[in-house]
Image: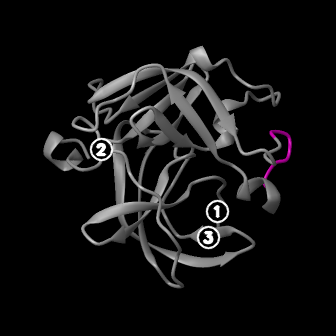
Amino acid sequence: LTDRDDLFGWEAVGRVDIGRAGFCTGVLIAPDQVLTAAHCVYDRAGQPVAAETIRFRAGLRDGEVIAEAGVTGYATAPDYDPQGGTRVENIRNDAALLRLATPISSALAAPFAVHERPRDGERVSVVSYGRDRDKAPSWQRECNMLWRAEGIMGFDCNVIFGSSGAPVFARHGNRARILSLVSAGNWQG
């Protein structure tokens, strides 16, 4: 999504910069709240990163943003274990909510709602930033939900490092809604 016109409607998806350590993808669900993956807010040793080192950059494209804000705090799912790896229980709880220091106006980036319930075989899309494509979001317009069990879902979406926390969208009327988040990957060939 390298042109401003391409980005229209997806401005609430942004890059979550974590100090100098890297980045993830996040999405506004309220003017002052960003949903992302919990593993994004822990360092390699499993220690929480300082909230003030995190920045959300909504609609980042070629160094320009729609809006950006620092983070004053965050909460992760209570059962998430930063040392737990890719156990089913951990993937199911790999979600974090970031509180922005300054709300981002809905006129600039309209927050997305959460989808109610997935349907078997649902077609989904993903908007994410990733390694080697971190300057602008990529939109995979269509991928498939392959399975769902125990509160997690498998998709055939094209994601890579940096896509963690990216929203997986399902269509609901004329607007996409958040069905899931990118958490962990599995390369099958």
* Mark sitting earlier along the chain (2/1): 2
Q: Element at badge 2?
A: loop
Which image quadrant for residue 72?
top right
Query: In the image, what residue type sits under mark 3?
Result: Gly
Left or right: residue 126 compared with residue 183: left
Mark 1 and mark 3: Cα distance apart in space: 12 Å
x 82%, y 27%: residue:
45
The residue type indicated by label 2 comes to Ala
Q: Residue at x 38, y 51 (%)?
A: 112
Q: Quadrant of the C terminus?
A: bottom right
Label 3 CA crowd tier, 10 Å (few <14, some 14–19, many 20+):
some
Query: Residue 141: image x %, image y %?
Result: 33, 65
Residue 85 magenta: yes
At a point 39% along the width and 35% down the height, the residue shown is 31
Chain part drawn in magenta = 82-86
- Determine which residue is flagged by label 3: 154
Q: Which residue is mark 2?
A: 110
Q: Is residue 116 left or right of residue 133?
A: right
Q: Give 178 or 136, whichever is nearer the viewer.
A: 178
Of mark 3 and mark 2, the one earlier in the sequence is: 2
Q: Which residue is mark 1?
A: 187
Seen as rendered, the residue at the extreme bottom is: 120
Q: Nearer the viewer, residue 95 or 17?
A: 95
Position above or below: 50 against 135 = above
Badge 3 element? strand
- Return the mark for residue 148: none
Q: Nearer the viewer, mark 1 or mark 3?
A: 3
Q: Is residue 116 left or right of residue 81?
A: left
> Dot 1 surroundings within 10 Å: few (below 14), some, or many (20 or more)?
few
Disc 1 element = loop
> Which of 135 and 146 lies nearest the eye of the viewer?
146
Amino acid type shown at disc 1: Trp
